[in-house]
Structure formats: C-alpha cells, structure tokens
Amino acid sequence: VQDIPERAHLYNGQTPQGFTMEIAIAAHAKASVDGIDNATDDVQLALRIGHRAVIVDGGPHNIKITHAPDLEIARLLLERKLGRSKVVRLTRPFSFDEREVLCTPDITRIAVRPLLGSICAADLRYYAGKRPADALRRKLPMALLHEGVGEVVFSPLPELRPGTRVVIVPNIKRCADPTCRACASEHIGENYCPSNAFLSSGEDGLMQSLLELDARNVVPVPDDVATDVAVMTEVASIGVGAIRRLEDLAGTACVVGAGPVGYATQVVAAELLGHEPVLVKHGDPMPAADIYFEAAGGVGAEAAIRDIISAARPGATIVLLGVSENEIPLNTRLVLEKGLRLVGCSRSAPIDHRVTLELMAHPHVAAKIKKLVISQRFQLSRVREAFDFALARSAWGKVLIDLTA
Ligand SMILES: [Zn+2]
Ligand SMILES: [Zn+2]
C-alpha cells in the first residue's frame, strides 16, 4: 500500500459508457491504427483522441456481470422484481380467489404488467357457469380476461423499453412441431393449431399483476392511441383477421349482428374494404351481398345464418365470427346452388393486432371504437362488481377493469 486516496473524491464507475456514434467509431479506429490492444474501456480510447468524459448518475442495481457471484446477484435482483405475481382466479362460477404465485423469471421473454382489461362474452360464460360442466372442471381455477393493454416491465429487446404500452396478443404458441400445417399456413393460422393455447381459455388471463410473454405476443401501442381505445384491439382485430383471410374483396359486404364484434368489424372493414358495410341488426331485412360477416352468435346465430344463405349472391363468402354453443341446421341445398363459401374465424394473429392499432391511430377510427366501451371503470380488487354489472347489463358497451387497482 503506497497511498490511501481521499474517498470523497472517488467514484464507482459503471457500464455501459455512452458516446455519440462518431466519437465511438473515431476512438476505436484510432486505437486500432495505433496498435492499442490493452485499453481497459472505451472512455480511455475517447480520452486518447482528446475528448472529455463527464460523469452522470447511475443506479445501484446496474451491476456489471464479471464474476460468477455477479450472476447470482443479478438473478436475485430480477427475482425480486419479476419473481412474484398476484393472480386473481375464478375458482368456480361467481367466486374468485386472489393469491401470490412465485415464478422463475426468464430473461429472454417480456414481462408485462396488465393495465386495463375488457370483459368478453367468453369470460362471462365462465363466470356465470354457462360452459359445460366438464369444461369448467378442466379449466378452472383460471385468471379471466384476454382483451387488454399492459406495460412492459422487463424486456431483453431495445425496441420494447420498460414503460412501453403494449396490446397483449392472447394466442400462446405451444406447438413445437416444425411440420405442423396449421402453424405454417397463414390462412389456417397458428391460432387454430390444437397444440396452442389461448389466454383466459384454459390458460391464466390478464387478471394478474405480472405476465411473462414471448415478444410475438406484445404489440406496442402507438403514442397517439389512448389506452381505452387500444384495449379494444383484440375485439377489432377479429374482423381484420377475417378480411386478411378473404381471397376476394370485391363486391358489397354486410356485417350481421350489432354486438361488439359486429360493430368493430364494421369499423375496420370500412377502412380495409374502402366502403362501409351495412350493419344488419336483429330483425332487419337481410340485404343481398357478396361478403357476409356473421357476428350474431349465441341464440341469434341460427336465424342469421339462415337469412344470410337465402339472401346471399351466387359465389358469396360467409365468414362466421359469432360463437354459439348450439348446433345449427344448414340449408346445404342453397349453399350448393349458389356455390357459397363458409369460413370460420374467431381468433386473430399478431399481424392483425398490428394492423388494428395502425387503423386506431386515425382519429375517426379511434372515435368510433371508443363508443364500444362504457365510461365507468371497475377495479380488480372489486372484480365481482364488474362481472355482476356486465352480467346484469342488457345495454350495449364493453365493461373495463383497471387491473392495477
Ligand atoms: Zn374476447
Ligand atoms: Zn401447430
């Protein structure tokens, strides 16, 4: 020991060190020309060519991983931040349970904190026990909600910084078969592969404080799209996905069913088809058309599909978007006579979410989509109120839950 320096004048330097690109390139180029191969860090090279370095404050958790114990410290820090999630699960109809679950963070994936979610008819069917008993037995307990917006908490990708608002794509890829026809084909779509999963359908949905997702399952929300508009992305993306899968966009189109999916499909179709399709409500006469989006579903599906088949023009395409628990008779004679095409489509891919958000960045589209949601907000801590309200409600409008409260 030759000397003990005055501590007040010492700094603990952290990496990374920041430079403008020109300075970094010039410093390294000069070092290479001069044959320097023993520099400790980049700042040293910048100082060599006459630049001045300034000190900025860092954070104590920005540790450098050099030795094996550093990795252990990093893992502990990450686990403290990402290692536990508060999950609210439906255990049986009308009953929720909240608990903290421990998880092992995977730093190759994106950690998202759900912010705002919307109740779907599918969630309500679980809540009210309207699914077959064996489905309830198999799928519960489960966190509900698959339509929502979150905020990135951790991400290994520079383009997805913490704090970025993202729409969560609820199709979870599980299929590991590289020859799978459903996953490989854009037209069948990986969401129809039976090996894959779907949030709040056998897989914990958004009613949790932290969710780990693959990069493909998060789509950044453009700055000018409000969170209570972006929360409708999944709902509106179903129509976008249906249109993407159509081979022929010519002719007149018609949306049947004035629920949220029908209304949102009319909004996105007006943009993507270049003309606004007629929205056919329950009891309206069915117009002749070349493309039908059937979004009636439920008990209305049978009458809607019957009327569509009789009104359809020859060669028309009927896209079935509405979910019905019942089997429905089909007039196959008319389907054959007119050469109709029936396409089933209820789930959308990440690309459809992206396109939907681009459409929502147009103020006139955002204004129409915003009409889908009611202004009242419910809190996750009082989640039963939200579901009871949605269940009792006969009026139009999606019920939103603040997932942070
Ligand atoms: Zn839904
Ligand atoms: Zn597959």
Image (tube, helix red, strand yellow):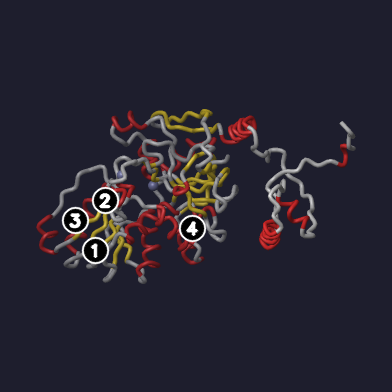
Residue 399 seen from this side: no
The mark closer to the camera, 4 or 1, is 4
Q: Residue at x 11, y 60 (%)?
A: 336
The mark closer to the camera, 4 or 2, is 4
SS category of the residue bearing label 2: helix
Identify the residue under disc 1: 286
Label 1 sits on what residue type? Met
Identify the residue under disc 4: 370
Q: Earlier along the polypeptide chain: callout 3 or callout 4?
A: 3
State the mark number for residue 300: 2
SS category of the residue bearing label 1: loop
As measured in the structure, the alpha-carbon distance from the residue carrying label 3 to the one carrying label 4 is: 32 Å
Q: Earlier along the polypeptide chain: callout 2 or callout 3?
A: 2
Q: Quadrant of the N terminus?
A: top right
Is 153 in front, or is 21?
Answer: 21
x, y percent for residue 163: 60, 48
Label 3 sits on what residue type? Arg
Label 4 sits on what residue type? Lys
Q: Assess whether mark 4 and mark 3 are in contact (beta carbons under 8 angstroms).
A: no
- Above or below: residue 276 compared with residue 385: below
x, y percent for residue 340: 17, 61
Q: Earlier along the polypeptide chain: callout 4 or callout 1?
A: 1
Identify the residue under disc 3: 306
